[in-house]
Amino acid sequence: EVLPEFPGGTAALLRFLGKNLQVPEDALEAGQRVKIPVRFVVSKDGSLGDLEFPVQADERFKKEIQRVVSRMPKWKPGSVQGKTVSVHFTIPIIFETTEN
């Protein structure tokens, strides 16, 4: 089985998230960090869908994650025995602020 992959790999995904994710205003105190797992399906054509949040999360964070995921380019789809398949994929999204 080959897992789906963001174009350019994990490093490119981290750069994309770092460039596009914004901490919702007044959602975190200085120095605070919140980790929110997000689950989605990478379809056979590489498009993303069926976004889910397996843990309770503030709506402001969920909306920001939905905004950024909707802007992601198509992923390289997963495969099993050489056949392209849709795959559920989970990644942690981390929001953090710096100390003042």
Image (cartoon, rainbow, N blue to C red):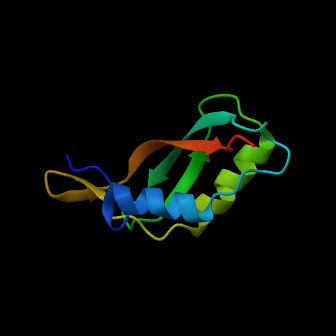
User: Does residue 5 show up?
Assistant: no
User: Which residue is the extreme one toward the top?
Assistant: 55
In the displayed structure, 1 sits above or below 47; it is above
Q: Quadrant of residue 67?
A: bottom right
The picture places residue 13, in percent across and down from the top left corner, at 43, 59
Q: Residue at x 36, y 67 (%)?
A: 7
Q: Is residue 84 left or right of residue 15?
A: left
Q: Position of residue 72 (x, y in %)?
A: 52, 66
Q: Is residue 75 left or right of residue 85?
A: right
Count of numbered marks: 0
Q: Position of residue 53 (x, y in %)?
A: 62, 37
Q: What residue occupies the far right of the structure in this picture?
A: 26
Location of the C terminus by quadrant is top right
Please determine whether, in this image, residue 50 is positioned above or below residue 27: below
In the image, residue 19 lies at what x, y percent?
57, 65
Q: Residue furthest front?
A: 100
In the rendered view, does 79 fall on the left or right side of 99? left
Kindly identify the residue that appears in the image at 58 percent across and 59 percent down.
69
- Give the camera-side residue of 69 and 51: 69
Depth check, front residue: 14 or 82? 14
Residue shown at the point (78%, 51%) measured from the top left: 24
Q: Quadrant of residue 93?
A: top right
- Residue 49 seen in the current view: yes
Q: Image quadrant of residue 38?
A: top right
Q: Residue at x 79, y 46 (%)?
A: 60
Image vertical order of residue 91 relative to residue 21, above or below: above
Q: Is 10 in front, or is 96?
A: 96
Q: Which residue is at the front of the view, 64 or 52?
A: 64
